[in-house]
Amino acid sequence: MSESSGSTGRLYGVGLGPGDPNLMTLRAVQAIGEADVIAYHSARHGRSIARSIAAAHLRPDHIEEALVYPVTTETTDHPGGYRGALEEFYEKAAARLAAHLDAGRTVAVLAEGDPMFYGSYMHMHKRLADRYATEVIPGVTSVSAAAARLGTPLVEGEEILTILPGTLPEEELTARLAATDTAVVMKLGRTFPAVRGAFEASGRLAEARYVERATMAGERTGELADIDPASVPYFSVAVLPSRVDAPRPAPSASGDVVVVGTGPAGPLWLTPETRGALAAADALVGYTTYLDRVPVRPGQARHGSDNKVESERAEFALDLARRGHRVAVVSGGDPGVFAMATAVLEVASQEEYAGVPVRVLPGVTAANAAAARAGAPLGHDYATISLSDRLKPWEVIAERLRAAASADLVLALYNPGSASRTWQVGKARDLLLEHRSPDTPVVLARDVGGATESVRTVRLADLDPAEVDMRTLLIVGSSQTRWVRRGESGESVVWTPRRYPEA
């Protein structure tokens, strides 16, 4: 509530609820009773849903102000286009209400649902509330009404509810629906075909419900997939209810495996597609450290294992899928870069698993994350090499380092050292110094995105193996890579120019 002194009137933004007059709050009824002026929005046909909800509480002595939109969905010849026409309308409507307020009259602006939730009232509020004493009276939203009418929990426990306007581009809707637990999509009508397409593309169509004119005459509910697009009005919503205790599909012959990357650290690095795949799976399989990054969901089995049993883990996941389960194999970074995708596909290539569908979803790689923190050291050609000799001999690693160094490629070096491998970094440094200047910048990026993140740059000649472990990624610059300190703070920035000098 905002306050104003003087003899001016009071402004009420009155939430009326979703449509049933019985769902108006006592305070909403009181505010209407106290008002001298009742204002409401309507289209050019003159009928106002807001007025119809509050009709029983209007008096003959109320002054009524019908705020009639000049356009709704049609085109306009206004020089500012559709948005310009509406801005001009809001300014004029606010001026009409201000005249009443200046005359000392109390003005109640009626709003379906809640005044501050996708409501027309907020445009009056932004123009008037700083000048007049104002009270906003909340109302029951169409979201709450829809959930009540479906008789299904909307959101529970630690689930995340996302509310979306159906006017968003279909690709954006798809990404948002894939990433969230539960959702409500507003403003259907002409947007319905694209909204339905987004539900289908995100793999959520089977869960989606439809509610039309909740609590009002002509109310309709049903499965979203069954709704005729031509029959959908603006006052309808699409709902993804809570997944907690919702029946998951029983195991069938159509199980599958999706291999996902969680990025280098926590949830900030997950893509919407990956979030959706993790939520849709009924079984998660992975190295325990990576599984711990994924939220626990009711009804979802979790199978953690040690980091050194990749083939066994892949076989276990494929066996689950063969028995009809939807399995997500959880990997760090990008699953196709020194990670689980190779192990899964290697086992999946065996004849006994030929019928199991396998998908690989990309993730943010450790190299990309480290490079972004340092600047843009991977801005030109680069090579990615693992220094671990657990799966290939050091002689092969050394030969590849020489080849990449002699080609003047930037190097992203994975798995540089561990408790049992303490000499490879020193060997690699000495080998690279045969081809690179001692002043070549080397980025040491440790635990990027994690609680102990550390990113710094040193000269190649000063690279100390004792400062490198398995959680560290090294980026070694080429002859063209630049390392500068910017501004008064001395911020260190490393980048490799995209243009390579001609010979």
Image (tube, grey):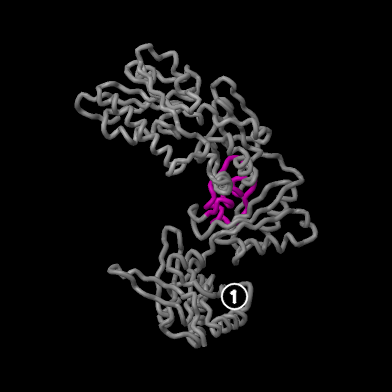
The answer to whether residue 195 is magenta is no
Q: Nearer the viewer, residue 91 or 172?
A: 91
Residue drawn at (51%, 81%), measured in percent from left and top? 428
In the image, farthest residue toward the right:
351
Residue 252 coordinates in the image, percent (x, y): 75, 43
Residue carrying label 1: 389
Viewed as shown, does residue 427 lie left or right of 354?
Answer: left
Residue drawn at (76%, 56%), measured in percent from left and top? 353
The answer to whether residue 271 is magenta is yes
Q: Amino acid at mark 1?
A: Asp
Q: Nearer the viewer, residue 418 or 220?
A: 220
Residue drawn at (65%, 35%), measured in percent from left and top? 229
Q: Secondary structure at mark 1?
A: loop
Instruction: Judge the density around disc 1: few (<14), some (14-19), many (≥20) Cα neighbours within 10 Å.
Output: some
| Magenta-tinted stretch | 270-299
In the image, farthest residue toward the top:
60
Q: Is residue 79 above or below residue 331?
A: above
